[in-house]
Image (cartoon, grey):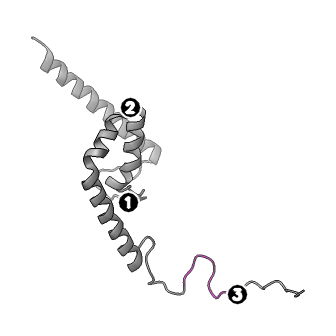
Amino acid sequence: MLNKQPQKARKSTWPPGVSGNPNGRPVGALTKVNKAVKQAMQVSLSEFVDNKFEEIQEIFETLNEREKLSFFLQILPYAKPRLAAIKQETTIKSETGFEHLSDKELTQFIIQVDKNNLNKDQDENRCETSPF
């Protein structure tokens, strides 16, 4: 029997999550091979759908409502790419005098303006629909 000694953890100059190449491949970027495979699959899928469209449509018509919804939900990512969440912070400098308000006070002000606008819209709608 061979006596195997446990391997020591390899020491790295870089901490976890940090690369020695800051200008390296961006997150989510496709390699040349991945691009080629993705394009080939798109062409193949497109040709399949084109050749079998009527058959797919006939099968779809036999599905119940729940199965139709499930089908749409499953193909949706291929038809419309997902949107990524973006966090953005902005600083607004204005001469309106709102800078001194806290976030809570500013939120309350916005709610009040929304209520005033809603009431104004409702009043205008009443005038438009009123026979007088």
Identify the amino acid type marked 3. Answer: Lys
Question: Of the residues under marks 3 and 2, which one precedes in the sequence?
Answer: 3
In this figure, what is the number of numbered marks? 3
In the rendered view of the protein, which quadrant contains the C terminus?
top left
Q: Residue at x 27, y 26 (%)?
A: 119
Any mark on residue 11, and which? Answer: 3
Q: In the displayed structure, would residue 31 be above or below residue 75?
A: below
Main SS of residues in magenta: loop
CB of mark 1 within 8 Å of CB of mark 3? no
The reply to whether residue 31 is in sight is no
Q: Give the left or right position of residue 14, taking residue 78 as reference.
A: right
Q: Which residue is mark 1?
A: 90
Q: Which residues are magenta?
A: 12-19
Q: Residue at x 35, y 56 (%)?
A: 81
Identify the amino acid type marked 2. Answer: Glu
Q: Local crowd at mark 1 within 10 Å, few (<14), some, or many (≥20)?
A: few
Magenta stretch: includes residue 6: no
Q: Which residue is mark 2?
A: 65
Q: Residue at x 36, y 40 (%)?
A: 110
Label 1 element class: loop
